Image (cartoon, grey):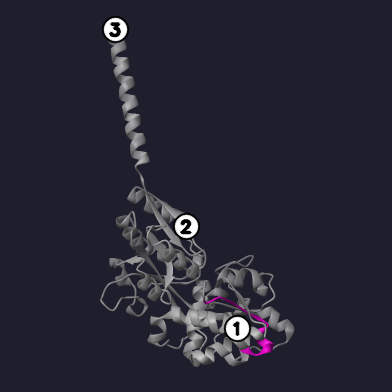
Amino acid sequence: MQLLVKQGLFKRTLIIAGLLLGSAASAQTTLTVISHDSFEVDKALVATFEKANSTRVRFVKAGDAGELLNRLILTRRAPLADVVYGLDNSLLPRAREAGVLDAYRSAALKTVPAAYRMDEANGTTLLNTVDYGFVAFNYDRAWFQKAGLALPKTLDDLKSPTYAKLTVVPSPATSSPGLAFLLASVNQYGEAGAWNWWRTARAGGMKVTRGWSDAYYKEFTRNGGKFPIVLSYASSPAAEVFYAEGFNAAKLPEQSPTGNLFLPGSTFLQLEGVGVLKGAKQPALARKFVDFMLSGGVQTDIPTRMWIYPAAAGTKLNPVFKFAQQPAPTAVKPALLARPQRLIDGWVTNVLRR
């Protein structure tokens, strides 16, 4: 009898313990991170973050960076995520005006040079810079060699029918590289001159795609498209070498299959950041994820995963980055950066609808 009672007590203990463990498992938090489509981070690093914070990280991709911001604005009363990665210095003014971000300055931001920080005038920080890159035109070396055509030397050359019909760019309305180039063109020509440049280039055959991925992976000749000039990044040639068959970091080729066209007035310094979304369900975890994105492991992982430069000073780069040139872009007038949406609206009215 006593044995049966003991067995019954033991079984009840096991059941209660199981229920407690099940309750603990079901109570595990989920941190939702929303980003543009090009975001990638090492799964092993994410797993370490999850284990350290007893959480599960759920990633949501929301199109190109411009589309990402549009979704955040449309859903700001019921946020889709806790933290956002991929908004940049050209989109920050609109994000600020829409009130989609909560202020948080990571202690790890001290590793980022002041020139690359997106600090607010009042001393707060809405986006912590994770990486930076240079928006620039790339060209397909083999295509131009075969065609026997000289490269364009200026933006005026690029808008001519000879080169416009060879060029593809992502839309400024939905793509952060597209917006970056729009800002650069207005900075170079003024608004009226920029609208004329875009209209002339489009009339000459320049293609405008919805986002960077479409421009680079569908329309660029290196990937089976018809356009040997594409608006991308100055680091893209390094990626072409890295992903080439038989890549060996110890035996790098003399040159990359693509090159950069640093046409005067065409490049733009893009700063990408991570921030906490206003109304986040997990604000404390969101802040920890911001810190995580600036940690040494993630910063080292970024260059050969997203093909941009890590923001933290002193981060070691893969030797292939010798093919990632850094131009000296013309400083964009602060007034243009302050209200980029006005320029996007102007582009839609004066270029897209003409």
Pinpoint residue 99: horizontal percent, then vertical percent: 34, 68
The residue positioned 31% from the left and 75% from the top of the image is 119
Number of the label disc, if any, that sits on residue 231: none
Question: Crowdedness of circle 3 by 10 Å Cα count: few (<14), some, many (20+)?
Answer: few
Q: Which residues are magenta?
A: 159-172
Percent coordinates x, y for residue 15 in the rendering? 34, 25
Task: Report the Cα–Cα distance between label 3 and label 2.
Answer: 58 Å
Mark 1 residue element = loop
Please, what is the three-letter code of the amino acid marked with disc 3?
Answer: Met
Report the residue marked by disc 2.
Answer: 60
Q: Position of residue 283 (x, y in %)?
A: 31, 57
The Cα atoms of the two marked residues, 3 and 1, are separated by: 92 Å
In three-dimensional space, the C-alpha distance between marks 1 and 2, rounded to whole angstroms, equals: 35 Å
- Helix or strand or loop: what does disc 3 sit on? loop
Specify which label sits upstream in the sequence, 1 or 2: 2
For mark 1, what is the residue?
354
Which residue sits at x=39%, y=74%?
Answer: 92
Residue 270, visible in the rendered structure: yes
Q: Are marks 1 and 2 in contact (CB under 8 Å)?
A: no
Sequence-earlier tag: 3 or 2: 3
Q: Amino acid at mark 1?
A: Arg
From what the image shows, is residue 194 above or below residue 168? below
In the rendered view, does 107 fall on the left or right side of 319? left
Q: In front: 86, or 222?
A: 86
Q: Is residue 335 above or below residue 46?
A: below
